[in-house]
Image (cartoon, rainbow, N blue to C red):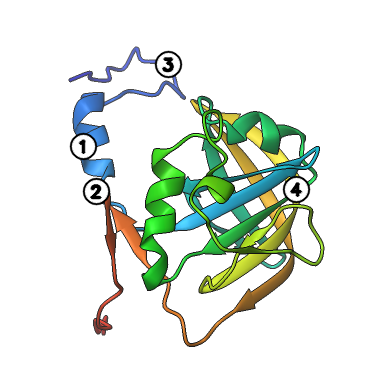
Amino acid sequence: MLTCSKDTPAGTIVRMQPLSQIDREAWRFINSVSIVTVSVDGVANAMSAEWCAPVSLKPPLIGVFVGEERFTRPLIEHAPTFGISLIAEDQAWIGRVCGRFSGREVNKIAEFNIPTEPALYIDAPLIAGAAAQFECRVLDRRVYGSHLLVVGEPLRAVGDPTKRAIAYSRGRFYRLGEEVEGE
């Protein structure tokens, strides 16, 4: 463990625990199961994105983190738009396929018959039957450590009230359960 003293310069970041413990506990986060789609020069790709969430309500903005080793990374670095589909309970297999296989080796959409539908305002397809879909225009891109944060402005958002989105944590998919009182 590192410690601070009176001689430690202001603004110095001191890690109080080993990274292995921080990594282990970070798996406790519960995330939506988002499929990010992007299309460049007629080539569409779908990627599971565990780290995808709203970053602002006014104006509405959505952020997605893409790892440097991902096939989607160079695509989304150059694409002006991208799609996000929050997959439904009956679509967990899509999350698994899009997370397990790389677009570098296989066209996941074609090879696994992932149901898609055309978007209205972006080039990338959206996952058909998803609980919610967002068509986004890229607003900003920044690198944080090993990941590129892409912030998008939703041009269109649609949801199916009969579908329930699923959650992901510790390498597994989950149905959302009962509401817990917080009062």
Q: Answer whether labels 4 and 2 touch (C-beta < 8 Å).
A: no
Q: How dense is the environment of label 4, judged by Cα within 10 Å: few (below 14), some, or many (20 and up)?
A: many
**Disc 3 target residue:** 9
Point out the frontmost of discs 3 and 4.
Answer: 4
Q: Earlier in the sequence, mark 3 or mark 4?
A: 3
Q: Residue furthest top?
A: 7
Q: Quadrant of residue 157?
A: bottom right
Query: Against 177, is 48 above or below?
Result: above
- Residue 2 in the figure: left or right of residue 160: left
What's the residue type where badge 1 is placed? Arg
Q: Nearer the viewer, residue 63 or 19?
A: 63
Q: Earlier in the sequence, mark 3 or mark 2?
A: 3
Q: Secondary structure at mark 1?
A: helix
**Residue in the picture at 65% in, 76% down:** 158
Q: Which mark is residue 24?
A: 1
Q: Answer whether labels 1 and 2 touch (C-beta < 8 Å).
A: no
Q: Earlier in the sequence, mark 1 or mark 2?
A: 1
Image coords of residue 28 (percent x, y): 24, 50
Q: Nearer the viewer, residue 115 or 32?
A: 115
Q: Secondary structure at mark 3?
A: loop
Point out the frontmost of discs 3 and 2.
Answer: 2
Q: How dense is the environment of label 2, judged by Cα within 10 Å: few (below 14), some, or many (20 and up)?
A: few
**Disc 2 target residue:** 170
Image coords of residue 116 (percent x, y): 62, 62
Q: Secondary structure at mark 2?
A: loop
**Residue in the picture at 26% in, 25% down:** 19
Q: How dense is the environment of label 1, judged by Cα within 10 Å: few (below 14), some, or many (20 and up)?
A: few
Q: Earlier in the sequence, mark 1 or mark 3?
A: 3
Q: How dense is the environment of label 3, judged by Cα within 10 Å: few (below 14), some, or many (20 and up)?
A: few
**Disc 4 target residue:** 138
Q: Quadrant of residue 74?
A: top right
Q: Earlier in the sequence, mark 4 or mark 2?
A: 4
